Amino acid sequence: MDLEVKGIAASPRRQTQLLSRGKKCQGWRPDTSAARGPRPPEVPCLDLGKLGDSDDEDGNSYVPCSRSFPHTHSLNSSSDWRTSLEMPRGQHLPSQQRTLPENLPTPTDKYKQKYRQYEADMKEEYKQYSERTAEKKRNHLQCPEASVKGSQFEDGHNDDRTALDEKALLQQCYTSKPYNTQHNMRKSEAEDVAAEKKKQAVVEQVMLDQLCRAVISDPEQSTRGDVSKEAHGHLGLGTAPVRFRKRTLHETKIRTKSGLTENMLSNKLRFDSRIISRNGRDACRDLIGFFFTCDRSLTVYEFRQFGKNRTNALPFIQKGVYHHQRGQKKGEAYDLSDFYIGANLTFQSVDHNLPKSIKQNPILTLRVIGIDEAAMDFLKGSSLKFNQEYSEQLIDDGRVFKKIQGMLRKTLSKRGVRVVTGLGKYFRHIDKNGNGFLSQADFKEALKLFHLEVSEQDFESLWLILDDSKSDKVDYGEFIHAIAGEMNEYRKAFVRKAYMKLDFNKTGSVPMVDIRKCYCAKKHPLVLAGKATEEEIKLSFLETLGESCSNPEEVSYSEFEDYYEGLSIGITDDDDFVNILRNPWGI
């Protein structure tokens, strides 16, 4: 490498070597006009006339530059042509000689119109982007429903709202989306695929069970000789009775009067259901039911997962024809019109092999939370007796509920969490038997205690609807839902999902320590705005949730559900309520 020390001139011999090396290699060369020659044949001629607009060009046409730097000297040699191309564009001419070429065509009307359209589109896009950015900033930095302590509602009244209500309403700020759109789509698609695989496994197990057991367990499979010998006690010493023998399919006669075929079983309606229970382990059971139109029978299976890879579908309600145990249709058999989202299916608990926690209530109630719409449409078209007309009595009952809930809506929108959780805690305290049923006097006292004004006439109408069995006692969970309303099944599905994430051992209750560990307040708008810390938001949530618990050290499913029932009253949009669960729990 040749180095030149500043302040010391190079020798004449060294200058000669540098000039001779510059002629041999390509690089920076002096721009002398003496050595220029004609343009070599391998270099194409530059035609600026082709830069004009044509009718065949599309929207992404070439836009000529407004300034150019042409060569003003003639190029006489290939060496000087290459030298001019290798030099930087700004060094061809001094800045005062950078002018437009004379032969450059003027812009056409088509180009001017395209440019004006492009300019208008860019302005409109920038305006929309600015509006979206400002709206997003407002959503992140402001709470739509709740605010910090001391703020007033729109009506200017804050007399009936306490500090506990203020802290509870802070949870309504979680309305921003927790993840980006791509993450949400991937997560929802994965959940849909897993749910479809689960349902398909249950369908296969149901068909396998019904096709095999219907033939093997049929009484007609017993031969008359075995029956007569068993009746007279002439069976051999080593022969077991017929009812205790293990019968296989190839030892039976296939054609029986009561045997079901695959074609008959294929006309079925699949539905998802859950148990209405205050026990968290029972309320979170994954139940999938089937209604067969061939004989109007139904069965319910429970999907169980053992470990990571082992799954099984076990019968929960055996296949049979069942009847309504409560309501307007008490004593009538179930038909296709009884299955819709939000419908209740009631069974006698003693008639089934159920867990002890479920048998504590004589009536088992299943809530339908999902329906196979394609199968329903097909069965409706093929069924001649389908009639889903609601009775006048059912419509009148709905009007009574809406009237009472409308009167209490304004009060509950301000202090819904405190009222709903307080009512649940109060009812659990006075329920000495633990069966969940209370008398009419208990409910009147509770309404008076929590300052919920319901007229005597409306209360009597409400009581006649709830006490359909005429036992002078009503389940207090149904009473709370009647006066305060109930979340739809879409919202309750996310409440159960959040609770199942907390109660991973399926014990039915969650320690408060685990809730403190799992709750995350990083996405709270007040935290993002710097107006509150994560610990302050977490403590406000734990304080309001702890007030609803009978035992401050743990949270049951009913207490967890009551908290979000009260919070749901003031939120009209389902997506906003789902974000309230997704942001802190990461579901």
Image: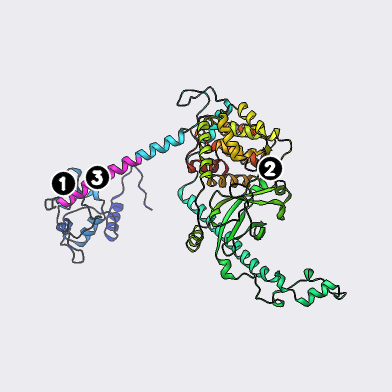
Which mark sits nearer the N-terminus, 3 or 1?
1
Which mark sits nearer the N-terminus, 2 or 3?
3
- Residue 198's spot in the image, x, y percent? 59, 59
The colour scheme is: rainbow
- Residue 307's spot in the image, x, y percent? 67, 57
Residue 193's tag is none
Q: Residue 246, located in which quarter of the rendered image?
A: bottom right
| Front-most of residues 77 and 469 | 469
> Of tags 2 and 3, which is closer to the observer?
2
Q: Which residue is mark 1?
A: 99
Which amino acid does the dot numbered 2 rest on? Ser
Q: Which residue is mark 2?
A: 509
| Front-most of residues 276 and 472 | 472
Q: Residues within 10 Å of mark 3 (few under 14, many from 20)?
A: few
- Residue 47's spot in the image, x, y percent? 16, 59
| Alpha carbon distance from label 2 to label 3 | 62 Å
> Of tags 3 and 1, which is closer to the observer?
3
Check whether the beta carbons of the residues at disc 2 and disc 3 lie within 8 A of each other.
no
Q: Secondary structure at mark 2?
A: strand
Residue, x 57% and y 68% (percent of image)?
264
Please provide the residue range marked out in magenta.
109-129
Q: Which residue is mark 3?
A: 119
In the rendered image, residue 351 lying in the magenta stretch gets the answer: no
Q: Secondary structure at mark 1?
A: loop
Residue, x 73% and y 35% (percent of image)?
432
Which amino acid does the dot numbered 3 rest on? Glu
Secondary structure mostly seen in magenta is helix
| In the image: residue 354, left or right of residue 104 | right
Check whether the beta carbons of the residues at disc 3 and disc 1 lie within 8 A of each other.
no
| In the image: residue 86, left or right of residue 300 | left
Which amino acid does the dot numbered 1 rest on? Thr
Q: Secondary structure at mark 3?
A: helix
